[in-house]
Amino acid sequence: MFCIKIVVLLLCFLAIHARLGEDVDDIIADAVQLSYQDPQRRFGTRNETTMPRTGNRFAFLQKQLEEEDRLARAGYKYLCLIKNLVNVSGRSNRDLERNNEFQTSFRKQLCDKVIPLCQEYEHSRFRSATGVCNNLFHPTWGKALQAHARYLLPVYDDGYNSPRERNRNGGKLPSPREISNKVFEGGANTPTDSKHNLILFAFGQFLDHDLTFTPIAIGSNGKPLDCCGADKSDPECIAIDIPANDNRFRNRTCMDLSRSIPAPFDEGCSIGYREQVNRISSFIDAGMIYGDSKLFHENLNGRVGTLRTSKGDLLPPGGACEISQPEDFCQLGGDERVNEVPSLSGLHVIFLRFHNILAKALKRKTHQTSQEVFLETKKIMGAIIQQITYGEYLPILLGGTTRAILDLNLQPTGFWDRYDPFVNPTVKNVIATAALRYGHSQIPPELGYMTRKFATSRVFKTEDVLMDPHMVVTKNGKNIPDLTRFLLATPSRKVDREVENAVRNELFRDMNGVTFDLMSFNIQRGRDHGLQAYNAWRKWCNLPVALSFTELYDHNYDSRMRLEQAYEDVDDIDVFVGGITETPRDDALVGPLFECLLGNQFRDLKFGDRYWYEKSGTEGFSIGQLNEIRKLTLSKIICDALNLNKIQRNSFFLPGLSNPLVTCSSLPSLDFSEWGDAAAPPQYH
């Protein structure tokens, strides 16, 4: 009997070996032929402006656009090919990835990557709208409509595509909603930040929308997938199971969610795995103000280099939102998410107005054409966003030691010339899908208005104003100063495990009263993207790895107990959950893991940007211009845009003895005498 088993095993081995011994080119060719026989996913025409009255309305904003169809088709075809290659070759996807012979043949037969020519960008003073050719050696690094990069390989259940759903012991990971209930449920009053205000939260979201936007799959009818209904069997559905004992969603068993659209690994030139698309450029380039294509720039461009406005010096009408008053309108910004929440919309108006203030001043000082004024102003605004981010925002988000080690501090004088063309600035998947979402813990239970005497005049529940522009556009924008004062004087929520009911239970309520849970979305999105678990990222950051729940030393007792109740094994903890529940160090806003991940990403964005604003040469500014830009603070921008009289010196901190109110006229302004007519004619593509 033993001999018979040996013979059977030997025959099986020889059969597999015979297939593996075939010409690698033929194996890949066979897989290609099989892929052409498989039905391809179809996309229908779609309405891209009218917000639906029911269902997951945020999915409407995130759904793939027609310009992303080509990428999605390539992604689905690529995954089909990888599936067939695994089956035909008899090897695992990971084995194929590591096999040089297969990789060489795959590239030779299938790679049709077109590398953009960058000669016209080599000496351009202005970055391209899409981010292409920022890096002259790697032209697509940081470009819009490219795959997110990765710090760690993904862990898909099938090795290349299926979401991470298995736990360490081979069972099923707990439902994201179950984890949300056990870990993120807050008390009646979630803890507030004693130092920082809601402008900090609002700017974090504003900045996030300059860096990343991941589109999600649609159905063949061009509409968002109904993953709890008619489309529940669609392979692009990753609906979230709702526990039977859920206190909020008692009559529902499912929360609708679809997968992020796929992109081929290495643009389809290597054997790999499912990647996800970033709709916008990765660079800190003020793309949320201007958009990430030349066509969108032109759409927003007004007269004499200004941006288009509507009555009241507001954003122009357009985009998608939920109108609650007949006289209101949806706003159009450089980013589709402009109407998500009034705090974000208010900042969009502030920076729109400040662009126009600068453009008019530049036009008066120079004899440039309207297009030249627009491009120069956009360049200055990009520099201002970089300066606020690294000079005012990151010193709060990250600790001093981390900033010093990663060279994230700004130069007080002179130029900074450490641009490195070998640093990839592309936003990493773990940043877009987990680390940058720390701000979801800062969301307040309400927004409101404050008078000039800082007396609250009216408040609105946060869940009632999501996707509704009323607080901003009503009375032609006359309430924006009151909204901004509320943000300046109201404490932010702490970055911790406690999350407001507004986004954990009441997110994006539709006309039927159906709501969603943002924390569940975050967890499931990380699994969709194949993000490795919390401990793997701790190891990548050279932080101590927990072998048991009691060894989660960067968590307090309450968080450790909740994590142990939610997960079977400490190695199962999702990176978003583990990261956001860590206790921040004394001089950082986030815990050690997110501090490490975010610090590395912001280093990539600085070192990998040929147009970093402190850099000398054609891509930068003169030393005189740079010194003028260095004067500006967010407080001054808010003052000028809203015509305020007083504001605290540091707009991210609550006003008080250490951060007193000052007159707006005492804050330095930009002097355009350093620009004059010496600027070279712009080159723009």
Image: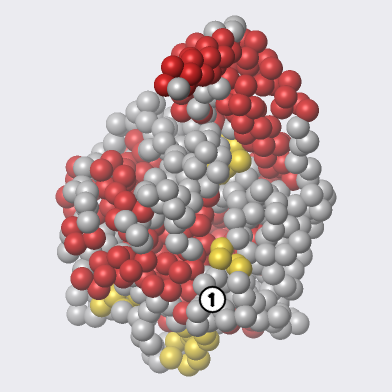
Instruction: Tell me which residue sits at (45%, 50%) in the image.
Output: 166
Instruction: Tell me which residue sits at (31%, 79%) in the image.
Output: 191
Q: Is the residue marked by circle 1 packed among few (<14), some (14-19), or many (20+) residues within 10 Å?
A: few
Q: Is 346 or 572 nearer to us in this picture? A: 572
Residue at the far front in the pictured view: 1
Above or below 285: residue 312: below
Q: Quadrant of the C terminus?
A: top right
Position in image of residue 446 (x %, y %): 47, 83
Q: Is 661 or 348 nearer to us in this picture? A: 348
Above or below 65: residue 70: above
Position in image of residue 286 (x %, y %): 50, 50
Q: Quadrant of the N terminus?
A: top left
Instruction: Tell me which residue sits at (40%, 77%) in the image.
Output: 185
Q: Secondary structure at mark 1?
A: loop
Locate residue 251 relative to residue 490 in the image: left or right: right
Q: Amino acid at mark 1?
A: Ala
Instruction: Tell me which residue sits at (62%, 75%) in the image.
Output: 252
Locate residue 494 relative to residue 241 in the image: left or right: left
Position in image of residue 260 (x %, y %): 59, 49
- Image quadrant in which you'd find residue 414: top left
Locate residue 250 relative to residue 451 in the image: left or right: right
Above or below 540: residue 301: below
Residue identifier under label 1: 244
Position in image of residue 615 (x %, y %): 35, 35
Q: Is 629 or 398 nearer to us in this picture? A: 398
